[in-house]
Image (cartoon, rainbow, N blue to C red):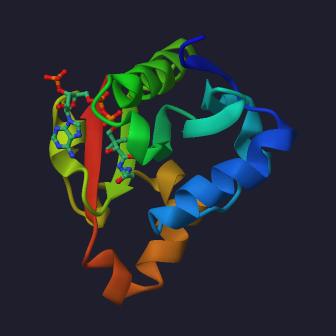
Amino acid sequence: MGVSLRPARSGDIPEIERLLAAEWLPPMAIQEFLESFWVLENEGRVAGAAGIEIYGEAAVLRSVVVAPELRGTGEGDRLVRTGLDYARDHSARRVYLFTMHAAPFFARYGFEPVTTDDFEPAVRESWQYVGLTERPEILKQMTPMRLRL
Ligand SMILES: CC(C)(COP(=O)(O)OP(=O)(O)OC[C@H]1O[C@@H](n2cnc3c(N)ncnc32)[C@H](O)[C@@H]1OP(=O)(O)O)[C@@H](O)C(=O)NCCC(=O)NCCS
């Protein structure tokens, strides 16, 4: 039966949270943004996720995760492309993200490293920006990135 990508449902949230927690990614505000969240389903289990948050002309790509056993098989790429297509379809012009280890992966899509000073006002309202700028010791381990669509 292969791996399918489908919109996330409320019932997926515990499994999404488990995947994120295993990678030390913040399992926050999933329900709030559920309509722009996707999961990978493999043999009845949630095996990956990604979400997009829209803030006017800007968007934040978040929670991109693929279960270890599926990595390197193109599923992360499928999740990112789905999120970026959603951002384009919702008139976003710029997409931001924070990553600790995956900057080279996101650079493949044209994401470039920026500083938090480059974040536009609408995105500064996002929980991730607020949370990270309040915790400089964590922020300094992250690479903020931006893609112009
Ligand atoms: C980053 C992650 C989502 C990539 O998922 P994946 O399913 O392994 O990626 P894919 O198989 O779709 O890879 C697509 C391409 O990117 C490349 N790639 C994958 N991970 C990469 C990385 N860390 N750095 C650079 N390139 C990478 C692959 O080699 C592949 O290249 P190819 O098309 O030339 O073969 C996955 O490694 C992961 O879940 N990591 C832990 C969570 C994380 O750090 N997420 C980012 C949080 S913001």
Q: Is the residue 130 above or below the residue 20 in the image?
A: below
Q: Is residue 137 left or right of residue 48?
A: left
Q: How many marks?
A: 0
Residue 62: percent from left, percent from top: 49, 47
Q: Is the residue 117 above or below the residue 106 in the image?
A: below
Rendered residue at 75%/38% (across/down): 34
Report whether residue 120 is seen: yes
Q: Nearer the viewer, residue 15 or 112?
A: 15
Q: Nearer the viewer, residue 44 or 91?
A: 44
Tell me which image quadrant ligand 1 sits in: top left
Residue 25: percent from left, percent from top: 49, 63
Rendered residue at 59%/19% (across/down): 5
Residue 70: percent from left, percent from top: 41, 34
Report whether residue 30 is seen: no
Query: Which quadrant of the view contains residue 8?
Result: top right
Q: Is residue 116 left or right of residue 58?
A: left
Viewport quadrant of the N terminus: top right
Viewport quadrant of the C terminus: top left
Rendered residue at 49%/19% (across/down): 82
Query: Which quadrant of the view contains residue 51?
Result: top right
Rendered residue at 23%/27% (across/down): 109
Q: Residue furthest right?
A: 11
Query: Which quadrant of the view contains residue 19?
Result: bottom right
Residue 38: percent from left, percent from top: 62, 30
